[in-house]
């Protein structure tokens, strides 16, 4: 009897030991799985930060490259012949002649792409505070809240320009017909809302963008036929990335403006551009200390164009 009890006790201990080993194995597996998962999360987080940094860097480089295109006087639009900015005379500025000497005055045109949105009113407030007029290249927004913003731009003496209705590259540049349809939609809408017919246009991405499969000259021709003047830029604020600072915006603009007699400055107006709003007041003060004259674009403004509109032949 004692032998049977001992054997049963021994078997129970074996079962308990086996169960304990299984529990220990399960616990260790869970711990190892958690450690591996945490390590994977850390590695992925580092990769995400790295990729974001690369996106910001490349985005900044693209806009610097856009600006340098005009500075080096050579532009290569997609699928078109090379344009020489130095050859632009009738409808643009000769780059070499536009370089500023120590005694030259600076004319500066602050332009904002992407209006209207929640930050547009703040930008207008800053401009009003300093008595400065700017130019807004707007897209289409039919919401009730944004209609007064369009009207305020006009009423406060700023230039109302067009930046496509949808601002979706794949739609705007799908074809010449799609571009013209988008243009007419925005032009008619702005005239309906503000009572003003806009005469100025900025291509999404600029006239030297690499997105369109249709030659950009085709779209320039559409604007020429409607007597619309388009503007590129020769100074970029670099405010497209997510990590730019107000100080960087100010430095990018003032260093660019110091090079030229006439500067068309590219800034962005978007709901994620609060840093641009923050930089605007100090930027205006810096430009004023340089003795720069800040003006809105009008029919007398010397044109910055990567593709000379006058060189585009009619069909």
Image: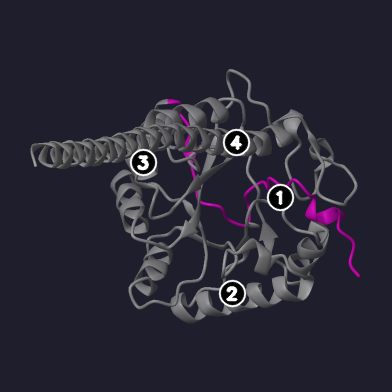
C-alpha separation, residue under disc 1 versus residue under disc 4: 15 Å
Pointer 4 or 3: first along the chain: 4
| Label 2 to label 3: alpha-carbon separation | 30 Å
Mark pair 1, 2: CA separation: 22 Å
Q: Is 298 in the magenta?
A: yes
Q: Read off the magenta span.
A: 290-315
- Badge 3, how many Cα within 10 Å: few under 14, some, many 20+? some
Q: In the shown orientation, is residue 159 left or right of residue 175?
A: left
- Residue ID for mark 3: 275
Residue 105 in sight:
no
Depth check: 22 or 108 in front?
Answer: 22
Q: Which mark is residue 187?
A: 2
Image x and y of residue 95, in percent = 74, 33
Residue 17: % across, % down: 22, 35
Identify the element where label 1 is drawn.
Answer: loop
Could you tell me which residue is drawn at 74 percent across and 49 percent down? 210
């Amino acid at each position: 009897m004692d032998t049977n009890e001992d054997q049963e006790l021994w078997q129970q201990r074996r079962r308990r030991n086996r169960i304990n080993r299984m529990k220990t194995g399960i616990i260790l597996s869970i711990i190892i799985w958690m450690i591996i998962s945490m390590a994977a999360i850390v590695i992925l987080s580092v990769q995400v930060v790295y990729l974001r940094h690369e996106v910001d860097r490349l985005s900044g480089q693209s806009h610097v490259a856009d600006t340098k295109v005009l500075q080096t006087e050579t532009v290569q639009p997609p699928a078109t012949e090379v344009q020489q900015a130095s050859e632009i005379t009738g409808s643009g500025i000769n780059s070499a002649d536009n370089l500023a000497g120590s005694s030259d005055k600076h004319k500066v045109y602050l332009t904002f792409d992407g209006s209207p949105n929640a930050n547009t009113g703040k930008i207008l407030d800053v401009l009003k505070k300093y008595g400065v007029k700017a130019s807004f290249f707007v897209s289409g927004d039919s919401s009730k809240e944004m209609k007064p913003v369009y009207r305020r731009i006009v009423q406060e003496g700023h230039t109302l320009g067009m930046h496509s209705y949808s601002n979706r590259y794949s739609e705007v540049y799908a074809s010449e017909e799609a571009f013209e349809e988008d243009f007419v939609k925005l032009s008619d809408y702005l005239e309906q809302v503000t009572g003003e017919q806009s005469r100025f246009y900025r291509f999404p991405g600029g006239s030297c963008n690499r997105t369109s499969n249709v030659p950009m000259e085709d779209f320039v021709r559409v604007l020429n036929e409607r007597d619309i003047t388009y503007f590129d830029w020769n100074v970029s604020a670099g405010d497209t990335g997510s990590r730019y600072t107000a100080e960087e915006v100010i430095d990018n603009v003032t260093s660019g403006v110091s090079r030229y007699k006439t500067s068309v400055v590219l800034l962005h107006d978007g709901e994620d551009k609060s840093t641009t709003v923050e930089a605007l007041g100090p930027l205006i003060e810096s430009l004023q200390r340089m003795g720069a004259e800040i003006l809105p674009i009008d029919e007398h403004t010397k044109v910055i164009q990567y593709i000379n509109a006058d060189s585009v032949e009619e069909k």
